[in-house]
Every structure is written in C-alpha cells, then in structure tokens.
Image (tube, rainbow, N blue to C red):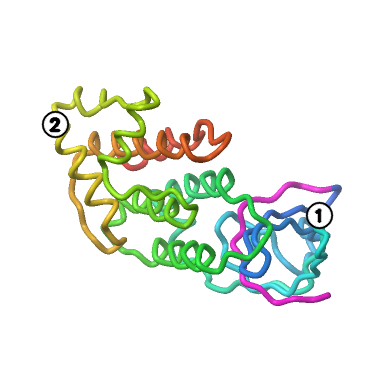
Amino acid sequence: MLHKTRSIVLHYLRYRESSIIVRMYTEAFGLQSYIENNVRSAKAKNKIALFQPLTLLDLVVYHRPDGGLTRLSEIRCHTPFKSLPYDFYKAGIGMFITEILGKTLKEETANPSLFDFLFASIQWLDEAQAHFENFHLQFLLQLARHLGFAPQSAAEILEQLSAEGHYRSSSAIGAGESHSEDILFLDRLIHSHYTDVIKVSHFTRRDAMEHILSFYRLHVENFGEIKSLHVLQEVMR
C-alpha cells in the first residue's frame, strides 16, 4: 500500500551494482529503510544527491506493517539546502547531528513531535546566517526532551554524572575557566532557543559538550563514543 510522508535522510549503503539501501526517519512510520534501484547509474531518475545525510524529502512509499525493506515510489526534495552542505562549519555540525541521530533514533513508529522538531531544527541550521555556534549543544538538550530524559538544570546533569563517576572539568580548569561558569552556561543552554546568542569561550563550550554527551551515555543504551566529535571540535574552535 502506498503512503505519503515527509522524511529525513540518515545514511545509505551501496547495494548490488547500482542500487542503495537508504535509512530514513519518516513522519509516518518512524525509522525505516528503503531500497532505491539504479540510483548510481548514469541514467538514474533520482540522483544520489537526494540521499545525502539530513536531506529533507517528500516521499510516496510502499509500507509493510510487518516491517522489512520496501521501495520508494516517488521522491521529491522538500527543502533544497541553501548552505548546510556547503558551509564548512555547518557541514561539521551536520555530520555530528547525523551520527547522534543514528545512535538515538530507534522506533519504527510515528512520533510527530520528534519528527517536527528534527525537521524544523535542520531547516533552522540551513537558514541561519550567524550565531549558530551553540546549535549542536542546544540541539542535544532539546532532543533529550523528546527522548524522555531532558535535564531540568545543570545541577541535575552534574549530579547524575557525579553519582556515576563521570564528572570532570579538566578542559575548563586548564583554560582558567570557573566551575560556576560551566554551570551557568549549561543552565542557559537548557532554557535557550536557537535564536539566543550566548557568548562563551571555546573551552567552556567544549566542556559543556563533554558533560552533555556523558549525560547521554547514562540514558541511551550503547551510545558509545562519537567519531565525528573531534572533527566538530576542530571546526568550531
């Protein structure tokens, strides 16, 4: 049976000679995988560029209630990107976000509020012209709310990390930043919107990232290490 849905591309794998298996987060069905045939051939109807990470698509898809791979019937780019794949800084953030979503999105059922949050966040990042240096941190904290473990304060994060023996502030100490500045920044991030401008040092931002990712490891099974973190930290230095 055919269904219309918006979707967010997460990644794809090459399949056979010219096809791919693409993993997407869809508005109608949550996390799904689809086969797209002949997309890597010179005469492909749908170009491989449509399946780059975080691309926003309108789809008509075949869906099987019992799960399993199905096919895409129609594909259209919902919002062509203006800057995200082309801006050096935004591309680094996008790589990081894609890896985070790959580790946290699990459900193969619709979650409209989560989907709307992700869709709108990606659009905001693409359209932002300045002051997006805290976007990845704000994104993580807002995503935690949709995943069901949002912290209410910086103190809650640090208390949970301390209880598990994960709390440390080495980068802030090395840069001469105060413990109170870490807490203040985290608190402001928790209650901020993407449009809020919060100016802090690179060291304070890096410390906040360590705390938030450690917090995720407490709440997301098999979260592990983030391979793109080093690239992001270099990009946002």
Task: Tell whether 199 sits left or right of 43.
Answer: left
- Where, by quadrant of the figure, is residue 45 drawn? bottom right
Q: In terms of depth relative to the viewer, which is nearer, 21 or 218?
A: 218
Q: Does the magenta stretch include residue 3?
A: yes
In the image, 12: left or right of 182?
right
**Outermost residue, right direction?**
16
Magenta segment: 1-15
Q: Is residue 57 positioned above or below 202 on the image? A: below
Q: Residue 195 lies in what quarter of the image?
A: bottom left
- Quickly name the residue at label 2: 178
The image quadrant where one finds the N terminus is bottom right
Which mark lies nearer to you, 2 or 1?
A: 2
Q: Quadrant of the C terminus?
A: top left
Q: Is residue 203 magenta?
A: no
User: Which secondary structure class fits the magenta region best?
Assistant: strand
Residue 194 drawn at (x, y percent): 31, 61
Q: Residue at x 39, y 53 (%)?
A: 139
Q: Residue at x 86, y 47 (%)?
A: 16
Q: Do the residues labelled 2 and 1 touch (CB within 8 Å)?
A: no
* Residue 19: mark: 1
Q: Which amino acid does label 1 sit on?
A: Ser
Nearer to me, 233 or 109:
109
Give percent across and percent down for residue 38: 82, 59
Give the distance between the C-alpha atoms of the residues marked 2 and 1, in whole angstroms.
Answer: 53 Å
Q: In this view, does 201 lie to the left or right of 60?
A: left
Give the amino acid type for the residue marked by disc 2 in the picture: Ser
Instruction: Tell me the element at label 1.
Output: strand
Q: Is residue 85 above or below residue 117?
A: above
Q: Give residue 135's position: percent from left, percent from top.
A: 34, 53
